[in-house]
Amino acid sequence: MTDEGTADAGAIGPQVAGSGLADVVAIVTGAAHGIGRAIAVTLAASGASVVGCDIEREGLAETEAALARTGGPTGLTVALDTTDPEAVTAAVDRVARTAGPVGLLVNSAGGVGGQTMRPVDEVDPAAWRHLVAINLDGTFHCVRAVVPHMRRRGGGAIVNISSGAGRTFSLTGIQAYAAAKAGVIGLTRQLAKELGPAGIRVNCVAPGFVRSNPTTERQWEAMGPAGQSALLEAIALRRLGRAEEIASAVRFLLSNDAAYITGQTIGVDGGNIMLG
C-alpha cells in the first residue's frame, strides 16, 4: 500500500533508473529506413541495447552502421518478416538468449506496400489482406512473442506506430491502410488493459505525414503543389514533421518519465488532427 501521491517503485518494475532506457534490450521493427530507423537510433543514443528488425536487408545494413555511430551498448539488426508468426517468435527468443531479457518493443513495421488509391469495389482481396498483414497482424505477432519475456523480466513497455489515417482517414485513399492502422489503436487499448497488471505499458503514436522514405516521397510528389499546400495549411505548425520528432515521442513513452501512461494514442502531427 502507498499513500496517495507517493511513488510505488514496485509498480514500475525494472524500469526505475533514470529514463529507464539504459542497457534495456529494445526491439524495433521496420528499422530499415525512415521512422523505424530514427526510433532505433534515438533509443540507442539513449543507452538502450537496440535490435532493429526489417524485411529489407539492404536498409538494415545502413541502420546497423547508424546504430554503431551512436556509441550505444548494442546495435544489432535482424532480417525478419513480421507477418510470419513462427519467424517472429524464433527471432524474439534468439534476441532474449543473446542480448538479454526484452524490455522494450516498438512496432514500426508497416506501410502501404506500394499500393495506391482505388475505389473500394475495385480493391483486390489479396491486396487488402497484405496491408492488414503488414500493419496489424505483424504488430500482434510481435507483441505475442515479446510478452512472455517481459512477464519474466517483471515488466516492460510497448509502443505501436499507427497513423493519422487510423484516427481519421487515409490521405491517399487506401482503405486497408486506414482500417489496419485503426486496428492498431484498438489493439493498443486492449493490450494496455490486459497487460497492465504485469507491469507492461502499451501506448501508440500516430504520426502525421512525414517524408521519411521513398514511398512517402512518391506520395508527396503525387499530391502536386495544390495538394501539398492544402496539407500544410491543415497543420497548425504549417510544416511537415521529421522522423526524429516521431522518435522523440516514442522515446518518451518508453521511458520512466511515462511510467503512469498506458493505453494512450499520441498524435505527433503538428496539430493536424487535434483529437486530443
Image (cartoon, rainbow, N blue to C red):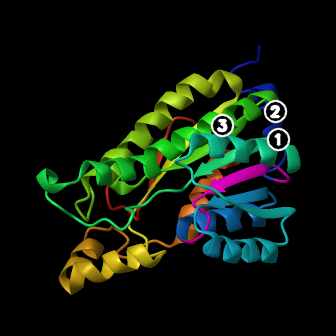
Report the label total.
3
Q: Residue at x 63, y 63 (%)?
A: 39
Separation of disc 3 and disc 2 at Cα?
A: 14 Å
Nearer the observer: mark 3 or 2; the answer is 3
**Above or below for 19 versus 208:** above
- Tags 3 and 2 in contact by the CB under 8 Å rule? no
Residue type at mark 1: give it.
Pro
Q: Which residues are magenta?
A: 22-33
Q: Give me the disc on residue 145.
A: 3
The question of residue 270 being in magenta is answered with no
- Tags 2 and 1 in contact by the CB under 8 Å rule? yes
Front position in the image: 171 or 17: 171
Where residue 169 appears, x then y in whole percent?
Answer: 26, 53
Front position in the image: 240 or 9: 240
Separation of disc 2 and disc 1 at Cα?
A: 6 Å
Separation of disc 1 and disc 3 at Cα?
A: 12 Å
Question: Could you say which quadrant of the image residue 85 lies in?
Answer: top right
Q: Secondary structure at mark 1?
A: loop
In the picture of the structure, the residue carrying the numbered disc 1 is: 101
Where residue 48 appears, x then y in whole percent?
Answer: 79, 56
Q: Is residue 274 visible?
A: no
Q: Residue at x 35, y 47 (%)?
A: 129
104 sits left or right of 196 in the view: right
In the picture of the structure, the residue carrying the numbered disc 2 is: 153
